[in-house]
Image: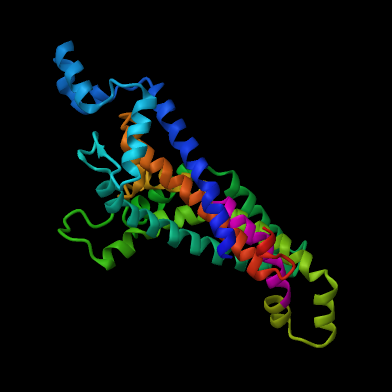
């Protein structure tokens, strides 16, 4: 396990270098002007000399290769730079927002996996039944629905029509501090929408995996020995049918991150999404590079976690050979 993690860590180094270099190159080709984004409305009446001086102070008068190398060498010492659009150190921006994005993704992922396993097992018990067709139809419908459309529909239904859940934010409008109770109430809609966007994949994979496992000889033998249906499902079919789902965990991380950005934007959740959008539109090089690295590391960590889980649960797979 340690050797696999070490090899993946060495592989991650050139990947991060290429990704950050690409981020700086794309930002340099962006039509947005970081100087005007930094100055705001004051840039409308500023003369060219003032704008050039501000451009030099921000360090955007250099080539993107020079800016990338300067950022990279500083990042190796722990200095991720200063965000020009948010007027804060990049480490402070990420530190304040990452915990809320991680909480949102963790809750949504847990709900999607748990509910997907339940629906998948129920559908796989009786292939072709009314319940099986209903679960499959629901999964395909949700798979085709854009996550932002689901989010807007949830706001309209639960916040505007029924008024049972808050429409957005982290706390109530008049609140002066963040309390666990308010966070728990405000996270229901965004986490639920994000979970629904990931639910079809887990449901369909579990349905297919458990359905195939129920037709295998070991499961038939367990039933012939007189074992209960619950024992056969949980102890035999579900364990075998979950193996494809372990691989799915790593592959769903990029989609989870993308969905989280849209969900956070719709529900005004104070996570990484707002910082990402502002960094992209304002061409905030240090913040944009740091967020890109963060997303890249999350994807690589998800793939590593999927491989480790697959090796632990499938005795036919040897981690030393991966």
Residue drawn at 61 percent across, 48 percent down:
141
Residue drawn at 40 percent across, 30 percent down:
24
Depth check: give the residue in front, 70 or 38: 70
In the image, taking residue 193 as reference, residue 78 lies left or right, namely left
Rendered image quadrant of residue 134: bottom right
Can residue 164 be seen here? The reply is yes
Q: Give the main secondary structure, helix, strand or loop, of the magenta stretch.
A: helix
In the image, taking residue 55 as reference, residue 184 lies left or right, namely right
Depth check: give the residue in front, 180 or 244: 244
Residue drawn at 57 percent across, 49 percent down:
142
Q: Point out residue 64 in the picture as x, y percentages from the top left corner.
A: 37, 25
| Residue at the bottom extreme of this rendering | 226
> Can you say which quadrant of the picture contains the C terminus?
bottom right
Is residue 301 highlighted in magenta? no
Is residue 238 highlighted in magenta? yes
Can residue 134 be seen here? The reply is no
Q: Point out residue 94 in the picture as x, y percentages from the top left corner.
A: 31, 49
Asked which colour scheme the image uses, the reply is rainbow
Q: Point out residue 63 in the picture as x, y percentages from the top left corner.
A: 35, 21
In the image, taking residue 214 as reference, residue 277 lies left or right, namely left
Q: Point out residue 46 in the picture as x, y percentages from the top left corner.
A: 14, 15
Depth check: give the residue in front, 177 or 137: 177
Rendered image quadrant of residue 59: top left
Residue range (magenta): 236-252
> Can you say which quadrant of the picture contains the N terminus?
bottom right
């Amino acid at each position: 396990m340690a050797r696999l993690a070490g090899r993946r860590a060495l592989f991650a180094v050139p990947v991060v270098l290429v990704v950050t270099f690409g981020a700086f190159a794309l930002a340099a080709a962006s039509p947005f002007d970081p100087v005007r984004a930094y100055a705001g409305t004051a840039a409308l009446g500023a003369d060219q000399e003032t704008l050039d001086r501000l451009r030099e102070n921000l360090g955007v008068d250099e080539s993107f290769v020079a800016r990338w190398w300067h950022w990279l060498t500083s990042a190796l010492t722990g200095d991720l730079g200063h965000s020009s659009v948010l007027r804060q150190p990049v480490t402070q921006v990420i530190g304040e927002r990452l915990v809320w994005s991680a909480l949102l993704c963790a809750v949504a992922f847990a709900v999607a996996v748990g509910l997907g396993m339940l629906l998948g097992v129920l559908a796989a018990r009786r292939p072709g039944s009314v319940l099986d067709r209903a679960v499959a139809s629901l999964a395909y419908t949700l798979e085709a629905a854009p996550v932002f459309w689901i989010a807007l529909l949830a706001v309209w239904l639960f916040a505007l029509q029924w008024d049972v859940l808050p429409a957005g934010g982290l706390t109530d409008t008049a609140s002066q501090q963040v309390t666990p109770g308010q966070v728990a109430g405000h996270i229901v809609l965004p986490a639920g929408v994000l979970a629904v966007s990931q639910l079809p994949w887990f449901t369909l994979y579990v349905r297919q995996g458990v359905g195939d496992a129920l037709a295998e000889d070991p499961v038939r033998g367990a039933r012939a020995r007189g074992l209960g249906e619950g024992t056969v499902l949980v102890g035999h079919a579900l364990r075998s049918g979950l193996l494809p789902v372990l691989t799915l965990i790593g592959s769903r991380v990029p989609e989870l991150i993308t969905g989280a950005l849209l969900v956070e934007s719709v529900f005004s959740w104070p996570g990484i999404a707002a910082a990402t959008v502002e960094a992209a539109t304002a061409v905030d090089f240090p913040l944009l590079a740091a967020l890109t690295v963060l997303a890249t590391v999350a994807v690589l960590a998800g793939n590593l976690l999927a491989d480790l889980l697959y090796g632990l649960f499938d005795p036919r797979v040897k981690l030393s050979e991966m």
